[in-house]
Amino acid sequence: MKLTIGQFNESFPPIVDGVANVVLNYARCLNNDQNACCVVTPKHPDAQDDYGFDVHRFGSIKVPTRNEYRVGMPQMSTSFWVGLKKIPFDIVHAHCPFSSGIAARSIARKRGIPFVATFHSKYKDDFKAAIKSDKIVENILLKIAGFYESADEVWIVNEASLDTLREYGFRGDVHVMENGCDIEPKYATEPVLGEVNKRFGLKPDEPLFMYIGQHVWQKNLKMVIEALGKLKADGERFHMLFVGDGAKRADMEQMVAELNLADSVTFTGRIRDRDTVAKIYLRSSAMLFPSLYDTSSLVPREAAACGCPTVFVKGASTSQGITEQNGFLIENKTESLADTVRRIIHEPEMAKCVGESARQTIYRSWQDAVKIAYERYLYLIDVNKSRLAKRAE
């Protein structure tokens, strides 16, 4: 059965974030000889949509507090709707509850096709940072909960995500659909390690730690820098790479300078080349990812593909399925993070064993993940057809 599938989301390359990566890989895996898949997303001035599948963009403006993001305005794009009407969608999948998600729901309702919505992010933290009124934030979260309740099926990336969705007021059922990874399992070689050392000025025996993602305080990055400052003050030798960019990068750089970490920390900016990212994982002793913001980040799977263990906060949504065998679990305290990093510095072979266990237990390819999603699409389409047939009787 050939399907025409729509992936709808507010972020998509050139915007770099986890959900944009999810949408990109869904579209890549689903657009093939048997099916057609397209992406629907806001316009971006730097976009170059040459992916091998169609990307349909609608009008947008910058997000005032996060200039790398766009606020979509599909209602202002007549030509966009004219073009979308020509696409014979069998199912639409929204990856956010904002303008693109609302557009997906509108299409589904008008055409009588299934509407899937995935809950990816803890939006509350973003709104609280931008809006100082708790009442307004609460009303926004209720609207988000209402959006998901309007879907034919809600997908969550892990069981822990449901607690957050319930907190927002959602009372419906959910289906767990885990994400994948677009980096194939890789192993370190001397040339690869040497290349990373040369690029970032590292000594061959220097322990390297990394973070990759948005440079925003919601990711618990103050604690990371504080822990590094403590280790440096104690005389530990290491280097840290912050890969990516974001609204708080300048503040992070200032904090690094104030803690005398400038010679031990490098801000790389965004690195779009996935092979380069993989090489950094291969060279790193561990990835520091103590985020309480994410529901289920992609980067621990990427790290696992390269045998790089990740440090999580115990009880965080991202730590679901993590044990002492395949990751490092810390308390949400600077001292706990510093102690764990110190242990990794002094027990490198132990850290390598944890990384190898992560490779065996955490890694999952996007091909495998999307294959499961595709089977679920088929099921939902069949259920919808049966429901419509009963109504017609």
Image (spheres, grey):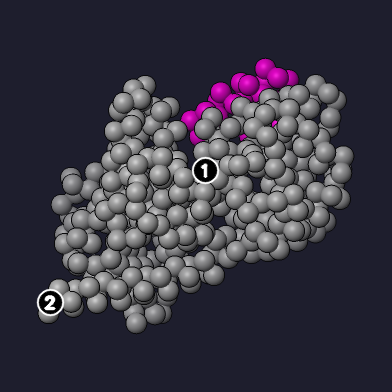
Q: Which mark is residue 392?
A: 2
The quadrant the N terminus occupies is bottom left
Could you give the CA–CA distance between mark 1 and mark 2, rounded to whole angstroms? 44 Å
- The image quadrant of residue 307 is bottom right
| Circle 1 SS class | loop
In the rendered image of this protein, does residue 245 appear above or below residue 393? above
- Which amino acid type is shown beneath numbered disc 2? Ala
- In front: mark 1 or mark 2? 2
Foreground pick, 375 / 145: 145
The quadrant the C terminus occupies is bottom left
Whether pointer 1 and pointer 2 mark residues with C-beta atoms closer than 8 Å, the reply is: no
Residue displayed at 18% across by 66% down: 111
Q: Pinpoint residue 358: horizontal percent, then vertical percent.
A: 71, 57
Furthest residue to the front?
171
In the rendered image of this protein, does residue 241 appear above or below residue 9? above
Q: Which residue is mark 1?
A: 294
- Which amino acid type is shown beneath numbered disc 1? Asp
Foreground pick, 389 / 183: 389
Q: Pinpoint residue 210: horizontal percent, then vertical percent.
A: 68, 41
Residue 315 in sight here? yes
Tell me the crowding category of disc 1: few under 14, some 14 to 19, or many 20 or more residues within 10 angstroms, Cα based: many
Q: Which residues are magenta?
A: 245-267
Tell me the crowding category of disc 2: few under 14, some 14 to 19, or many 20 or more residues within 10 angstroms, Cα based: few
| Circle 2 SS class | helix
Residue 243 in sight here? no
Answer left or right for 82 relative to 70: left
Q: Which mark is residue 137?
A: none
Is residue 252 magenta-colored?
A: yes
Residue displayed at 32% across by 43% down: 144
